[in-house]
Image (cartoon, grey):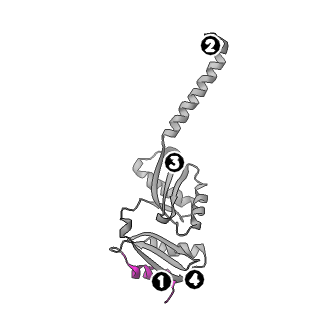
Amino acid sequence: MMGNRMMGAGGWVLILLLLSMLVSGAEETKDVAQAKFRVTGLFSKDRVDDLREVLTKLPEIKLVELDFDRAEATFEYDAAKALGTIKPAEIPARLDAALRQASFSTFGILPLSTFPSDKLELVEIPVVGLDCKGCSLAAYETVYKLEGVERARASFREGLVTVWIDPLKTDKSQLEEALKKRNVTLKTP
Protein backbone atom coordinates (compact mmCIF):
# COMPACT_ATOMS: atom_id res chain seq x y z
CA MET A 1 0.00 0.00 0.00
CA MET A 2 2.80 2.38 0.92
CA GLY A 3 4.54 1.70 -2.43
CA ASN A 4 1.38 2.59 -4.35
CA ARG A 5 1.19 6.03 -2.69
CA MET A 6 4.85 6.74 -3.33
CA MET A 7 4.70 5.88 -7.05
CA GLY A 8 2.40 8.75 -7.97
CA ALA A 9 0.22 9.25 -11.02
CA GLY A 10 3.14 9.54 -13.46
CA GLY A 11 4.47 6.12 -12.46
CA TRP A 12 1.09 4.48 -13.01
CA VAL A 13 0.78 6.11 -16.41
CA LEU A 14 4.18 4.73 -17.33
CA ILE A 15 3.21 1.23 -16.20
CA LEU A 16 -0.08 1.39 -18.11
CA LEU A 17 1.77 2.62 -21.20
CA LEU A 18 4.25 -0.27 -20.98
CA LEU A 19 1.44 -2.78 -20.47
CA SER A 20 -0.42 -1.39 -23.47
CA MET A 21 2.73 -1.69 -25.59
CA LEU A 22 3.15 -5.31 -24.51
CA VAL A 23 -0.46 -6.09 -25.32
CA SER A 24 -0.30 -4.36 -28.72
CA GLY A 25 2.97 -6.18 -29.46
CA ALA A 26 1.24 -9.47 -28.70
CA GLU A 27 -1.58 -8.51 -31.02
CA GLU A 28 0.87 -7.69 -33.81
CA THR A 29 2.56 -11.08 -33.63
CA LYS A 30 -0.64 -13.09 -33.57
CA ASP A 31 -1.20 -12.36 -37.28
CA VAL A 32 2.20 -13.70 -38.31
CA ALA A 33 1.81 -16.79 -40.45
CA GLN A 34 4.07 -19.29 -42.14
CA ALA A 35 3.46 -20.90 -45.49
CA LYS A 36 5.46 -23.25 -47.69
CA PHE A 37 5.60 -22.86 -51.48
CA ARG A 38 7.58 -23.96 -54.50
CA VAL A 39 9.94 -21.20 -55.56
CA THR A 40 10.43 -20.56 -59.24
CA GLY A 41 13.78 -19.17 -60.34
CA LEU A 42 15.96 -21.39 -58.15
CA PHE A 43 17.75 -22.91 -61.13
CA SER A 44 21.20 -23.01 -59.50
CA LYS A 45 22.73 -22.94 -56.00
CA ASP A 46 24.00 -19.39 -56.42
CA ARG A 47 20.40 -18.24 -56.88
CA VAL A 48 19.82 -18.95 -53.17
CA ASP A 49 21.88 -15.86 -52.34
CA ASP A 50 19.97 -13.93 -55.01
CA LEU A 51 16.68 -14.91 -53.36
CA ARG A 52 17.94 -13.79 -49.97
CA GLU A 53 19.00 -10.45 -51.49
CA VAL A 54 15.58 -9.95 -53.10
CA LEU A 55 13.89 -10.62 -49.77
CA THR A 56 15.81 -7.72 -48.21
CA LYS A 57 13.55 -5.53 -50.36
CA LEU A 58 10.53 -7.17 -48.70
CA PRO A 59 11.23 -6.76 -44.97
CA GLU A 60 7.75 -7.97 -44.02
CA ILE A 61 8.44 -11.36 -45.64
CA LYS A 62 11.06 -13.58 -44.04
CA LEU A 63 12.65 -16.73 -45.40
CA VAL A 64 12.38 -19.32 -42.62
CA GLU A 65 13.59 -22.45 -44.41
CA LEU A 66 14.78 -23.33 -47.90
CA ASP A 67 15.04 -26.75 -49.54
CA PHE A 68 17.02 -26.10 -52.72
CA ASP A 69 16.77 -29.71 -53.95
CA ARG A 70 12.96 -29.53 -53.97
CA ALA A 71 12.85 -25.77 -54.78
CA GLU A 72 10.60 -25.21 -51.77
CA ALA A 73 10.70 -22.49 -49.14
CA THR A 74 8.85 -21.63 -45.98
CA PHE A 75 8.08 -17.94 -45.60
CA GLU A 76 6.91 -16.05 -42.55
CA TYR A 77 4.84 -12.90 -42.93
CA ASP A 78 2.22 -10.71 -41.36
CA ALA A 79 -0.41 -10.69 -44.10
CA ALA A 80 -1.86 -7.32 -43.12
CA LYS A 81 1.55 -5.61 -43.06
CA ALA A 82 3.12 -7.41 -46.02
CA LEU A 83 0.13 -7.72 -48.31
CA GLY A 84 -2.59 -5.36 -47.14
CA THR A 85 -6.15 -6.33 -46.35
CA ILE A 86 -6.91 -9.42 -48.39
CA LYS A 87 -8.75 -12.70 -48.13
CA PRO A 88 -6.67 -15.74 -47.10
CA ALA A 89 -7.19 -17.34 -50.51
CA GLU A 90 -5.48 -14.33 -52.14
CA ILE A 91 -2.28 -14.64 -50.08
CA PRO A 92 -0.32 -16.91 -52.48
CA ALA A 93 -1.04 -14.66 -55.47
CA ARG A 94 -0.06 -11.55 -53.52
CA LEU A 95 3.15 -13.13 -52.22
CA ASP A 96 3.97 -14.21 -55.78
CA ALA A 97 3.32 -10.69 -57.10
CA ALA A 98 5.47 -9.11 -54.37
CA LEU A 99 8.34 -11.51 -55.02
CA ARG A 100 8.10 -11.07 -58.79
CA GLN A 101 8.08 -7.29 -58.51
CA ALA A 102 11.06 -7.21 -56.14
CA SER A 103 13.04 -9.63 -58.34
CA PHE A 104 12.13 -8.22 -61.77
CA SER A 105 10.17 -11.44 -62.39
CA THR A 106 13.12 -13.77 -61.85
CA PHE A 107 11.54 -15.38 -58.76
CA GLY A 108 7.98 -16.39 -57.99
CA ILE A 109 6.00 -18.89 -55.99
CA LEU A 110 3.66 -21.73 -56.82
CA PRO A 111 1.66 -24.08 -54.63
CA LEU A 112 3.50 -27.16 -53.44
CA SER A 113 3.52 -30.00 -55.92
CA THR A 114 0.89 -32.67 -55.41
CA PHE A 115 2.64 -35.08 -57.78
CA PRO A 116 4.51 -37.82 -55.88
CA SER A 117 8.28 -37.23 -55.99
CA ASP A 118 9.01 -40.92 -56.48
CA LYS A 119 7.00 -40.88 -59.73
CA LEU A 120 8.98 -38.01 -61.26
CA GLU A 121 11.27 -38.82 -64.17
CA LEU A 122 14.69 -37.16 -64.30
CA VAL A 123 15.70 -35.77 -67.70
CA GLU A 124 19.16 -34.31 -68.35
CA ILE A 125 19.81 -32.31 -71.49
CA PRO A 126 23.40 -31.30 -72.29
CA VAL A 127 23.56 -27.82 -73.81
CA VAL A 128 26.20 -25.40 -75.04
CA GLY A 129 26.25 -21.63 -75.00
CA LEU A 130 24.78 -21.07 -71.55
CA ASP A 131 27.63 -18.77 -70.62
CA CYS A 132 25.96 -16.62 -67.97
CA LYS A 133 23.27 -16.58 -65.30
CA GLY A 134 20.86 -14.78 -67.66
CA CYS A 135 21.21 -17.49 -70.32
CA SER A 136 20.63 -20.16 -67.69
CA LEU A 137 17.53 -18.32 -66.46
CA ALA A 138 16.16 -18.21 -70.01
CA ALA A 139 16.72 -21.96 -70.51
CA TYR A 140 15.23 -22.70 -67.08
CA GLU A 141 12.12 -20.59 -67.74
CA THR A 142 11.67 -22.22 -71.13
CA VAL A 143 11.35 -25.70 -69.68
CA TYR A 144 9.80 -24.77 -66.34
CA LYS A 145 6.74 -23.26 -67.98
CA LEU A 146 5.89 -26.49 -69.79
CA GLU A 147 3.03 -28.59 -68.48
CA GLY A 148 4.29 -31.58 -66.56
CA VAL A 149 7.54 -29.97 -65.38
CA GLU A 150 7.73 -30.13 -61.60
CA ARG A 151 11.31 -28.91 -61.00
CA ALA A 152 14.15 -27.74 -63.18
CA ARG A 153 17.73 -26.54 -63.05
CA ALA A 154 20.02 -24.98 -65.62
CA SER A 155 23.75 -24.71 -65.12
CA PHE A 156 26.00 -22.72 -67.40
CA ARG A 157 29.00 -24.13 -65.49
CA GLU A 158 27.98 -27.74 -66.22
CA GLY A 159 26.31 -27.07 -69.59
CA LEU A 160 23.26 -28.98 -68.43
CA VAL A 161 19.51 -28.48 -68.12
CA THR A 162 18.09 -30.89 -65.55
CA VAL A 163 14.34 -31.41 -65.34
CA TRP A 164 12.03 -33.52 -63.18
CA ILE A 165 8.84 -34.28 -65.08
CA ASP A 166 5.51 -36.02 -64.87
CA PRO A 167 6.12 -38.50 -67.73
CA LEU A 168 2.39 -38.66 -68.48
CA LYS A 169 2.37 -34.96 -69.41
CA THR A 170 5.69 -34.30 -71.13
CA ASP A 171 8.88 -35.99 -72.31
CA LYS A 172 12.47 -35.27 -73.27
CA SER A 173 11.65 -34.49 -76.91
CA GLN A 174 9.16 -31.77 -75.91
CA LEU A 175 11.74 -30.24 -73.56
CA GLU A 176 14.41 -30.30 -76.28
CA GLU A 177 12.04 -28.78 -78.83
CA ALA A 178 11.16 -25.92 -76.47
CA LEU A 179 14.86 -25.23 -75.82
CA LYS A 180 15.61 -25.21 -79.56
CA LYS A 181 12.79 -22.71 -80.14
CA ARG A 182 14.45 -20.48 -77.51
CA ASN A 183 17.72 -20.79 -79.48
CA VAL A 184 19.43 -22.92 -76.87
CA THR A 185 21.97 -25.15 -78.61
CA LEU A 186 21.76 -28.81 -77.59
CA LYS A 187 25.04 -30.66 -77.26
CA THR A 188 25.22 -33.55 -79.68
CA PRO A 189 26.62 -36.85 -78.41
Circle 3 packing at 10 Å, graded few (<14), some (14-19), many (20+), is: many
Mark nearer the N terminus (4 vs 3): 3
Q: How far apart are marks 3 and 1 (CA)?
A: 40 Å
Q: How far apart are marks 1 and 2 (CA)?
A: 81 Å
Q: Kindly identify the residue that appears in the image at 35 percent across and 69 percent down.
A: 119
Q: Nearer the viewer, residue 105 or 14?
A: 14
Q: Kindly identify the residue that appears in the image at 57 percent across and 53 percent down.
A: 58
Residue annotated with mark 2: 4
Circle 2 packing at 10 Å, graded few (<14), some (14-19), many (20+), is: few
Residue annotated with mark 3: 77
Q: Which amino acid does label 4 sit on?
A: Gly
Q: Distance between the residues labelled 2 and 3?
A: 42 Å
Q: Do tag 4 and tag 3 residues touch (Cβ < 8 Å)?
A: no
Secondary structure of residue under mark 2: helix
Q: Do tag 3 and tag 1 residues touch (Cβ < 8 Å)?
A: no
Give the quadrant of the N terminus.
top right
User: Nearer the viewer's eye, disc 2 or disc 3?
Assistant: 2
